[in-house]
Amino acid sequence: MSRPRSPAVSAAVRQGVSVSVATGLYGVSFGALAVVAGLTVAQTAALSLLLFSGGSQFALVGVVAAGGSPLAAVATSSLLGVRNTLYGAVVSPLLDVRGWRRWAAAQVTIDESTAVAVAQRDPQAVRVGFWATGLGVFVLWNVCSLLGALAGDALGDPRAWGLDAAAGAAFLALVWPRLASRDARLVAALAVVVSAALVPVTPAGIPVLGAAAAAIAAGLLSPAPRARRGGAR
């Protein structure tokens, strides 16, 4: 008989499933918008399968829809994709995977899987939360983006379905508990201010990178709490 699942692992699975459903459904929006922008159903499906980064995919489609060149579309998409490298640096030591699993982990290292993983405290729950979220989003995102592409513009404005808010709400629900301390709230506020200031004057992708850089700099410059220093002695 298998050992009963711990409460921490069960909670991680529930979080992963809920985030997967919310994010996966949003794939319908991407599929529909991609086809309206001029991509074929096959191109849309390949983009979701291979690139698999919602923000980067929407950025690419947005540039194409605005009449931008393929080079501009790829450059903008790549700027947003840089953040996944930072996520990889965070989750890699937590997962400790080798061989083909490392390649699989890299493919599903996204905003949602990283957020669920780092929100856990139990090491096993970290790993389970990461894989449950990453694989769940991967499957549902690809299925739903294909359905959206097949439906095309028959859905009308995807925002009318409320799918654009579902993924953001799920992600905010995960981040919110981590803003309990004053320092965390100040760093989050700084990131928001930097991002908002850059939006009107920089290309897509730069505000996200600027906010991330500001948060990292604030974390590096802030002194460690005295209690933590004492605990290490």
Image (tube, grey):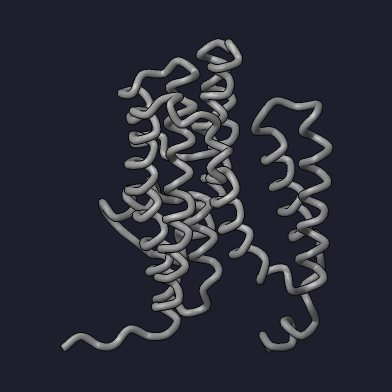
In this image, 97 relative to 74: left or right? Answer: left
Please, is residue 25 above or below residue 19 in the view? above
Quarter that holds the N terminus: bottom left
Quarter of the image where one finds residue 115: bottom right
Residue drawn at point x = 75 percent, y = 27 percent: 202
Q: So how many labels did they put on this image?
A: 0
In this image, 178 relative to 102: left or right? Answer: right
Residue drawn at point x = 57 percent, y = 39 percent: 160
Which of the pair 16/224 is nearer the observer?
A: 16
In this image, 74 relative to 98: left or right? Answer: right
Whole-percent x, y for residue 164 in the image: 57, 43
Whole-percent x, y for residue 155 in the image: 46, 31
Which of the pair 93/186 is nearer the observer?
A: 186
Please, is residue 49 above or below residue 222 in the view? above
Whole-percent x, y for residue 84 in the image: 52, 45
Q: Please, which residue is most extreme toward the left here?
A: 1
Residue drawn at point x = 51 percent, y = 29 percent: 156
Quarter that holds the C terminus: bottom right
Quarter of the image where one finds residue 119: bottom right
Residue drawn at point x = 52 percent, y = 22 percent: 74
Please, is residue 205 above or below residue 162 in the view? above
Which of the pair 89/17 is nearer the observer?
A: 17
Please, is residue 71 above or below residue 226 in the view? above
Whole-percent x, y for residue 95 in the image: 40, 64
